[in-house]
Amino acid sequence: MAASMRLLVRRAIRLSHKNITLTAAGAAARSDCCRGSLVCRCFSDEAEDRSTHFGFETVPETEKAKRVYKVFENVAQKYDIMNDAMSLGIHRMWKDTLLHVMHPQPGAQLLDVAGGTGDISFRFLDYIRSQEERQKRRVARSSQTPSWRDISNNYSTQDEPRESRAVVCDINKEMLKVGKQKADSLGVSAGLSWVVGDAEELPFDDDQFDIYTIAFGIRNVTHIDQALQEALRVLKPGGRFMCLEFSKVNNPILSRIYDAYSFQMIPVIGEVIAGDWKSYQYLVESIRKFPNQEEFKGMIEDAGFYCVKYYNLTGGVVALHSGFKL
Amino acid sequence: MFKNVLSRLVTETVRSRRYVPNGPVIQRLIPASGPVRTFTDRKGEAQPQFDASLLDVLVCPLSKKPLRYDAETNELINEELGIAYPILDGIPNMIPQEARLIQKDSAETPTH
């Protein structure tokens, strides 16, 4: 009996050896954010399954998608409130900046991946509408005193050959449900579509969209390079890829304040408002695991985009990356 | 100051949550052959119709081939691979694992 126990113990040690090394890597990562990722990577190569990071934890790749899904399923109802509370309303400025840099023209087709509650798409449709009104006003001003016949002719030829459209694609049904409810209550429905889809395997044909956006979603994707490949595929030639994501703060003082706020305030706010500490702990940790501005720019260039540049917003808390398919 | 922000956020969400779909459940009113106009009926339909204009851009994520909208089962069907993607609340679910296999006459749902 002692021999069989010894065999069992030995097998248990062999099995747990892999887990221990992985959790050791995880612990190392927790104490030393940037360098921990290298430790995680060499241990994960030894493991049989490919593993990736879920916040500061190391999980098998197949697990990550499921856990991310659960996180967003839990936070979906309170997502918008939490965004306002955590960022003190600044997230609205970030999204408005995205739209201003995008500067979409009437007739543009937008694909908003990980669009969830639809913030970007609503802003897109508003922007287009105000652009159209501005164009109409400009035309009216330039043709100041025509006859009523000329005016009526102008109206008939002014129809857009193509209506602008925004497609919101998200892997999570709950987030889309919340977004659809928001759209219905705001009365926005024309040109807005909702699809459940995986960013790594988009259900869209090649060369379809003028603009592809992914706002605060790409760090939750398991294979970021695959998502970038898909983005390149569905964009038309000349199409623009735009990504808003939390990034590295370079200023050391701001970085310390930001870290303290992230790790101490945000999970607390998450617990108070949404009743979910762990999801917001994941959120804060996943921000630290995401590559910095230059690295991500390199990844976008590797996927095949040209003229890749990034804009730092709020001192580097958020970075807006942009690339073109040429 | 935080309390004011909180109260304002709460009232905004209460206002946005006040939309309640009322009216009878009208399903499969419009035949698949006719033009499907979904967004004209905003209220009064608990089951919103699927917008056929999405079919221009939607393809099967696995084979990238166009799909056929089946109004009876409210699904998007890929004939080649024999799979059907469900549509819930007017939102098509294009995740491959959630697609239903159509095997001749019997239908098997793959476990997710």
Image (cartoon, coloured by chain):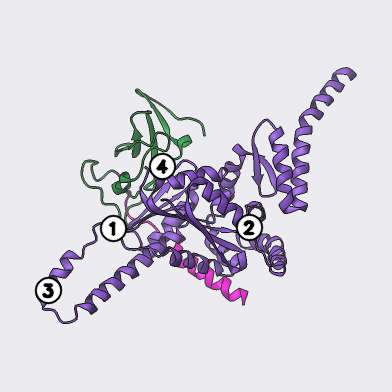
Chain colours: A purple, B green
Name which residue type carries label 3.
Answer: Asp
Can you tell which of label 3 and label 1 is closer to the viewer?
3
Label 1 SS: loop
Can you tell which of label 3 and label 4 is closer to the viewer?
3
Q: Residue at x 23, y 57 (%)?
A: A161
Dot 4 or dot 2: first in sequence order is 4
Q: Which residue is mark 4?
A: A203
Establish whether labels 3 and 1 are both on one chain: yes
Q: Which residue is mark 3?
A: A150
Establish whether labels 4 and 2 are both on one chain: yes
B7 inside magenta stretch: yes
Task: Report the Cα–Cα distance between label 3 and label 2.
Answer: 62 Å
Establish whether labels 1 and 2 are both on one chain: yes
In-image side of A174 versus A127 (left or right): right
Task: Report the Cα–Cα distance between label 3 and label 1.
Answer: 24 Å
A236 inside magenta stretch: no
Residue sitting nearer the eye, A118 or A153: A153
Identify the magenta region.
B1-27
Name which residue type carries label 1.
Answer: Glu
Can you tell which of label 4 and label 2 is closer to the viewer?
4
Q: Residue at x 33, y 57 (%)?
A: A191
Q: Which residue is mark 2?
A: A275
Dot 3 or dot 4: first in sequence order is 3
Q: Which residue is mark 1?
A: A163
Dot 3 or dot 1: first in sequence order is 3
Q: Whole-percent x and y of residue A43?
A: 73, 38
Subunit that carries the residue with mark 3? A
Please report contact status of discs 3 and 1: CB closer than 8 Å, yes or no. no
Asked if A6 appears above or below B21 in the picture, the reply is above
Residue sitting nearer the eye, B36 or A112: A112
